[in-house]
Amino acid sequence: MTKVLIIEDEELMIKALEFRLKKDGYDVHLARDGAQGIEKLNSDSFDLVITDIMMPFVSGLEVVSHIKSNPMMKETPVIVLSSIGLERVVMEAFELGVDDFITKPFNLGELVIRVKKFVRQKDVFN
Amino acid sequence: MGIEFSVSNYLHDLYISRLSSHPLYIFLSLFIALFCVIGIAEVLIYIFFRRGKEFYKRKRDADLKERIITMLANILVFNDHDDPKVVVSHFLPRFSRLPLYRKSIRKILVAELSNNHANFSGRSAEVLTELYLQLNLDKRARKNLNSRQWDKQIEAIRELTEMSIKDECDKVLKFTDAKHPQLRIEAQIAFVKLCADNPFRFLDTVKEPILDWHQLILFEVITKAETMARPRFAYWLNSANDSVVSFCLKFVEYYQQFDALPNLIYLLNHYNLKIRGAAIEILGRMEAEMAESHLVAVYPHQPQKIKEKILNTLGLIASGGCLSFLTSQAKSKEFPLRLAALRAIKAHRKDGREMLDTLYNEGVLQDRAIIKHILDGRIKA
Amino acid sequence: MWVFTIEAIVNNSIFFYALLLILICLGYVLISSIELGRYMRRNNYASYRELLISRHAPCVSVISPVANIQDDVVDHVRALLALQYNNFDIIVVNDGSTDNTLQNLRDFYQLEAVDFVSYEQIKTQPVQAYYKSRNLAFSKLTVIDKARGGEPDSLNAGLNASQSDLVLCIETHCVLDKNSLLKLVKPFLEEKTRVIAVGAAVHVANSGGRHKGHLLSTSFPKKLLPAFQAIEYFKSYLLERLTWSRLNGIHPISGAVGLFDKEILTECGGYSTKTSKEGFELMVRMSKYMHDNNLKYRTVYIPDPLCWIQAPARFSALSKQKNAWARGNFQTFWLHRDLFFNRKYGSLGLINFPFLFFLEGIIPLMKLLGVLVISGLVFTGQVNREYLGLLLAMIYLFAVFLSAVSVLFEERSYRPYSSLRDISKILVLIFIAPLIYHPLTVYWKIAALVRLRQ
């Protein structure tokens, strides 16, 4: 089963994503802030990571750089989910190696399709 | 027992029997002391009473909130293909079972609904609005629109706007002219959000300055709205209300309305430095080559802050036509101007790079340091 | 007859002096309650989401001096990086640390020395190097390594390097609320006149759970001295600051956190390295500068608890701090003595400044004098003990009442310490504080005054 890690501090958002992705048959893991996210990433391996940027303790950008600078998980696709859609922020994220950037408010269905796309790509790759 | 007795006895003696025989200052002190004791007692009682009430309420509401969040998350899962009405009617019985007659529960539900509404777009948002209407949660808000208290009115306007209930649009328009600034801005926001066909009507009449804070909020609201009519903002650039001018400048830039360029150049002589500065910056971000000669022409008479902005703008335009002007400014006595000029030269890509190399070779120590500074990719500022 | 007259004069003067203080305090209560009510009502409806996502959010530099905090420095900076705002950079100034502070920063944030040129508008101790990270995730961060020069000197070095219009200056041991920038920036955008400084409430967090530079929970200090200080902060932040903010004046001590208009701050010379408490002096200098240049301005204080500090728990450390603050205040009064009753400076010179001098400088002396006279009278037996006791009881009750009101304000607004146990503790302590802590504060002020003369 595809393992997805969601790092997000908003309770509502995390629940909605969890339910939705579980319904589509993903194995969903949750982290409520950046520090927890990094802990989980270090102890387990995931097929996809969805993360917010502004979170307590450790910012999402640091999480992304943690993933992308680690040879073990460099290939893991990362989708950023942010309420700030400014070009400056988006560019910064992509420069760090983020694979997709979604601005809130967003369409849940669209997110699911994007997730599917990355998972398919990964399957083909393997 | 004996002590208690004597204390109350003493107080009785002090405050009643001997009251008339005290000197004035003791008389007054006694009253101040009494006032303080009553005040302290009231504070203590108030705090503990309030805490007790809240504790009881929180305990009652905590699991209900958890339940509401879970229910909402569940309803959002079904959204892509189904009709919102069908989805909602499927879930409605469960929501109706909530004790909605209680104010606190209604509040939690409405807060969660509107919060979710802000985070999701498309079908999920429609489902939430549908649920809001079917649970009759809108009744209260509609009633509060006519309240006399501005905070209630604001709450109502907000709630209706957040759930995108569009049929109260006219009532909201009335409030965009309200005396109360808070109510006015809330109404302006709501109007712009709800009335997508002509949201800028209020700009023609607004007399009070639109504060920077309000401009910022309105800007976000307007640019986030999906189906918004976009007027020619140049139309308002000669408004007598300076805040309307700077507000519209933001849109000229955002929508890249090139027909406003002549107006922008005209604004280079605006008496208000803030507007002049903003016009210069926007000319840069719109890469208006036609403005270059005007910018160079007005440059000598400007205060330093504006000079810096002109140099930055010339860097953004980077047509190559102003390289010699920039080079002359790179030798300015003022550090910020030198820095800005060198940055602008750098923005000219290959030509700029060559120019920087020449300047580096003939420059003195500090110029070299500045050039190194601006060429370092790690330093963004 | 003679004896009676002395006693009557003394008692009367004590009473009317107390009455004056009581009226001043009631004035504080009245004005601050109006201002608090207005602020709470207005900000009930404020949404910070638009500012958070706005492209027009003004750029802010957060300047944080650090010195010899090798164990905490990485988390401290990390917490700053996680602030909620979209347009800010962080300038950490290493003030000649002798431990591994700089090395730890360099290792964790992958820093490299860069050829940074800063516009040295304010003279500081020599800067040894500027560092930036090669990791893009930390591109907001600039680290300045400079020779030791104290906190104000480091803040000035940060000011020189900053490219933003607004700067947030924080003390090293201060933990910021994650929404601090949003809340502090708002007043700059919201006033019709130019805002030159915004301050926020500071609270004591000695016993809260900390994790990676963040505060997890805030609980009331367990030890007595920090607890007294926490209560004192209630009063000084909610009553006094709010009142002066309402009256558009300056306030006695400026907090560990302040957001400034950088242009004005650098124009008037930055932080002063001459006085021992730089915040108050700076506010006075900035206000003076604005008056001198005929510019309209406002200084705003917001009652949101944005900054949490570690209060000194040992008596000696606290004495030292209080001494330094009081000394700084007196130095400021002396340095800017031309303000006193100077009509050029309007209400600042005519009322605000002399009034603060009266509160900070004269009153402790009067209190001392009162204690000496009373003990003299008691010693020689020339006193009606009952009346004296009643006067003292009245003063004590008013002090308790005032603390109770400030607690009530906190209760109605932000509740920095929210558990029932904490509030009970606070309510017990306000009865003890006037007996133990208040005399100490008077003592510190007088000690500072005496030291100043030497």
Image: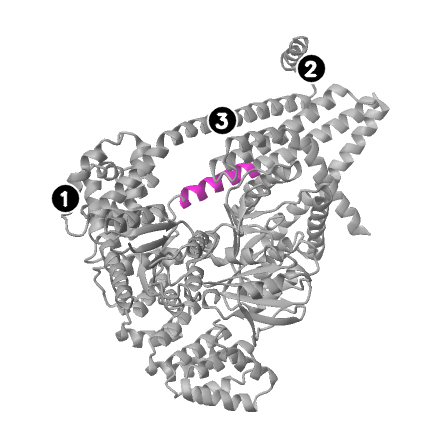
Looking at the picture, which amino acid does disc 1 mark?
A: Lys
> Is mark 2 in CB contact (under 8 Å) with mark 3?
no
Looking at the picture, which amino acid does disc 2 mark?
A: Ser
* Left or right: B4 in relation to C410: right
Who comes first in sequence, dot 2 or dot 3? 2
Mark closer to the observer (3, 1) = 1
- Label 2 Cα crowd, 10 Å radius (few <14 / some 14-19 / many 20+): few
* Relative depth, front residue between B81 and C427: B81
Residue, disc 2: B21
Check residue B85 in the rendering and tell me which mark sits there, or answer none: 1
Q: Is residue C178 visible?
A: yes
- Label 3 Cα crowd, 10 Å radius (few <14 / some 14-19 / many 20+): some
Residue B68 location in percent, x, y? 29, 38
Residue B333: within the magenta? no
- The residue lying furthest to the right in this view is C380
- In the image, the segment drawn in magenta is C28-43
Q: Which corner quadrant of the image does residue C385 belong to? A: top right
Q: Secondary structure at mark 3?
A: helix
Mark closer to the observer (2, 1) = 1
Who comes first in sequence, dot 3 or dot 1? 3
